[in-house]
Image (tube, grey):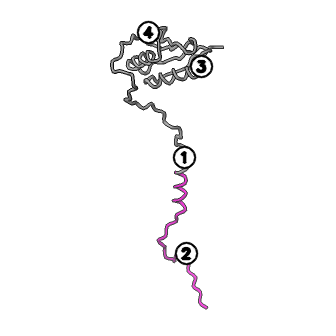
Amino acid sequence: MKTTWRHARFQQPTSELSMTPMIDVVFLLLIFFVCTASFQAVELVLPSNLLVSGTSDMAAPVELPDDLEQIVVEVVPAGRGATWQVNEQPCDSRLDLEQLLVAIAQIDSSLPVVVDCDDRVPLGEAIAVYDLCRAVGLVKVQFAAEAE
């Protein structure tokens, strides 16, 4: 029985690569990207050119408020609905409110808007005014709160 023993110094090198370090690096990169990724959905208002039936291309001229440092939209209950005032300028309908907000957004969409709702106004109306402000392009929309 013949056995050969060779010293490690005299063994011939092999061309095999060890995959363990590469797999470790791949897992580390995977963990890094999962931890640093943002899983929050991007919120955007998509523009559309839809025309609602009964609307026309000709809009009535809109009077803008004199003071355009801050826009205050007051929502006050009136009967079953609500009335709106923009910087103490009354709006007769939601369409008038929308036209006024569109005109303000075209001038400067970064103006801060404060939605000041009366306590008796339904929450749905407050959210509708907030959504309307965001839909016309105003980016800084906040609700007013009373200091206690």
Which quarter of the figure is the N terminus placed in? bottom right
Q: Amino acid at mark 4?
A: Asp
**3 vs 4, front mark:** 3
Q: CA distance from mark 3 to mark 4?
A: 28 Å
Point out residue 65 in the picture as x, y percentages from the top left corner: 43, 10
**In the image, is 119 to the left or to the right of 140?**
right
Q: CA distance from mark 3 to mark 2?
A: 84 Å
Q: CA distance from mark 4 to mark 1?
A: 48 Å
Query: CB of mark 3 within 8 Å of CB of mark 2?
Result: no
Give the residues drawn in magenta, as a range: 1-29
Q: CA distance from mark 2 to mark 4?
A: 88 Å
Reading the image, the residue beneath label 2 is 8
Q: Earlier in the sequence, mark 3 or mark 4?
A: 4
Q: Amino acid at mark 2?
A: Ala
Reading the image, the residue beneath label 4 is 67
**In the image, is 57 to the left or to the right of 12?**
left
Q: Earlier in the sequence, mark 3 or mark 2?
A: 2
Determine the residue positioned at 54% across, 46% down: 34
**2 vs 4, front mark:** 4
Q: Amino acid at mark 1?
A: Val
Point out residue 95 in the picture as x, y percentages from the top left corner: 44, 18
Reading the image, the residue beneath label 3 is 122
**2 vs 1, front mark:** 1
